[in-house]
Image (tube, helix red, strand yellow):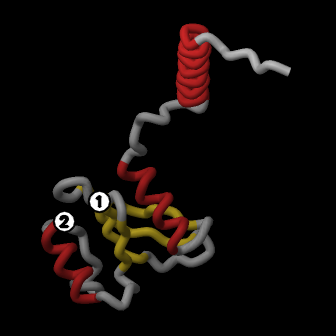
Amino acid sequence: MARRAIPMDRLIAVLGVVVLVLGAVLLWLAVRNGSVFVNPSPSERALRQLKEQIGPTTEIRYLEVGRGRAICGYASPREDGSAIAFISRPNRILLRTDPLQSEFGQMLRDVCPGFLHSPAAKP
């Protein structure tokens, strides 16, 4: 039984159509899911980070825009009234309750110099 060879021109045309169809499908999926190309706002980013660190019931109580893309604020779980200071950056969040107290204080002075402190919680 002889094997038929596929002409090279036809193979190139079929592969080109496949690439175009896959590109169209990926673009449609990206647009359909909504704003895939848009970064979340700093407050949305901070809330997501806080929910991962503290728990799903965490609420932001106070926010202050810092230098660069950092934001500072206070958050607490709904069932607990105690507020925890935080510094949110795009790839990292630091909480006052973290063991890195000196790093938290230094970063707070650097990115949010006028941050609102409670009298008992000085950096």
Q: State if disc 2 and disc 1 touch (CB < 8 Å).
A: yes
Q: In which quarter of the image is the N terminus?
A: top right
Identify the amino acid type marked 1.
Answer: Ile
Q: Mark 2 points at which residue?
A: 112
Q: Nearer the viewer, residue 50 or 114?
A: 50
Rounded to the nearest whole Å, what is the CA distance between mark 1 and mark 2?
8 Å
Residue 37: quadrant of the picture: top left
User: Is 27 in front, or is 8?
Assistant: 8
Which numbered marker is on residue 56? none
What element does badge 2 sit on? Answer: loop
Q: What element carries label 1?
A: strand
Q: Residues within 10 Å of mark 1 (few under 14, many from 20)?
A: many
Position of residue 79 measured from the top left corner of the image (x, y, whole percent): 62, 74
**Up/down of 90 relative to 81, above or below:** above
If you read the primary sequence from the N terminus, does the residue marked by circle 1 or circle 2 appear first? 1
Give the position of the C terminus as an image quadrant: bottom left
**Which residue is painted at 58% across and 19% down in the image?**
15
